[in-house]
Image (tube, rainbow, N blue to C red):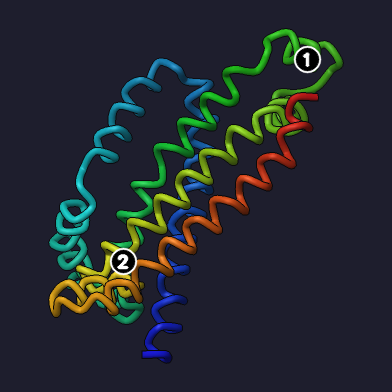
Amino acid sequence: RKDRFWGELIVHLQLSFGASCLSASFGIPLGIFLTRRQVISQQSFFVLNIIQTIPSIALFAMLIAPLAYLSSKLPFLQGIGFQGVGWAPALIALFLYSLLPIVRNTYTGLLTIDDAVVESAYGMGMTSSQVLRKVKFPLASSVILNGFRIATVQSIGNTAVAALIGAGGFGIFIFQGLGQAATDLILLGAIPTIFIAVCTDLILQGVINTVAPRSKS
């Protein structure tokens, strides 16, 4: 299964890291927005918490029907493989799961900055965008990166379940092994998934530790 292994490795990495990067590109701006519109922050986090509590298999299954309908109405989507099963529902579900830690950490990291520091920046003549880029973001970077770390590690694990809807990844070996009572197949999918998650966690933790001293200075 050597060729199959490397192919599923690429799929697994594309889905897990692609979902976490998409979540970061959407979740960080959302976290910034919620710090400025705290009236709707509670409702927003309520929705994100609900999404987080939905079992992964259930969320994958819930996306099958609407995506299948959408692809049937828009033929060009079928041409890129956007269907009720496969990579599309997997990527969307993983994206949704990754939102909460990124949005929450962005929101928390920006709000916990000392008001005196922010006021000093405004007193120096900085605009709101400059304060955000040059003061708030550097100070909150370790907290925000920690949210990205949690989301990415979580996404790597959830990607294994996405094999149930034809998305590919190491989950294929795991579920084939479970169906055939083949321990070697289960381990062929489980061990690399654990290895990737642990290595990713250590690498991102190292990045956070490098950034943290700057955030506190």
If the image is split into quadrants, where does the N terminus sit? bottom left
Can residue 157 be seen at all in this image of the molecule?
Answer: yes
Residue 99, x across and y down, in percent: 41, 42
Position of 43 compared to 195: left or right? left
Q: Nearer the viewer, residue 192 or 78?
A: 192
User: What element does badge 1 sit on?
Assistant: helix
Q: Residue 4: which quarter of the image?
A: bottom left
Tag on residue 88? Answer: 2
The CA span between labels 2 and 1 is: 44 Å
Reply above or below: 185 against 53. below
Q: Amino acid at mark 2?
A: Ala
User: What element does badge 2 sit on?
Assistant: helix
Q: Amino acid at mark 1?
A: Tyr
Residue 6, x across and y down, in percent: 45, 83
Position of 47 compared to 147: left or right? left
Crowdedness near tag 2: few (<14), some (14–19) or many (≥20) residues, C-alpha within 10 Å: many
Please name the residue that numbered disc 1 is placed on: 122
Residue 41, x across and y down, in percent: 40, 22
Q: Nearer the viewer, residue 184 or 175?
A: 184
The residue at the point 56 percent across, 39 percent down is 146
Query: Does label 2 or label 1 sit earlier along the sequence?
Result: 2
The residue at the point 48 percent across, 39 percent down is 102
Reply above or below: 183 against 32. below
The residue at the point 75 percent across, 14 percent down is 117
If the image is split into quadrants, where does the C terminus sit? top right
Say which of marks 2 and 1 sits in front. Answer: 2
The residue at the point 35 percent across, 28 percent down is 44
Whether residues under marks 2 and 1 lie with C-beta atoms below 8 angstroms apart, the answer is no
Q: Residue 167: which quarter of the image?
A: bottom left
Can residue 74 be seen at all in this image of the molecule?
Answer: no
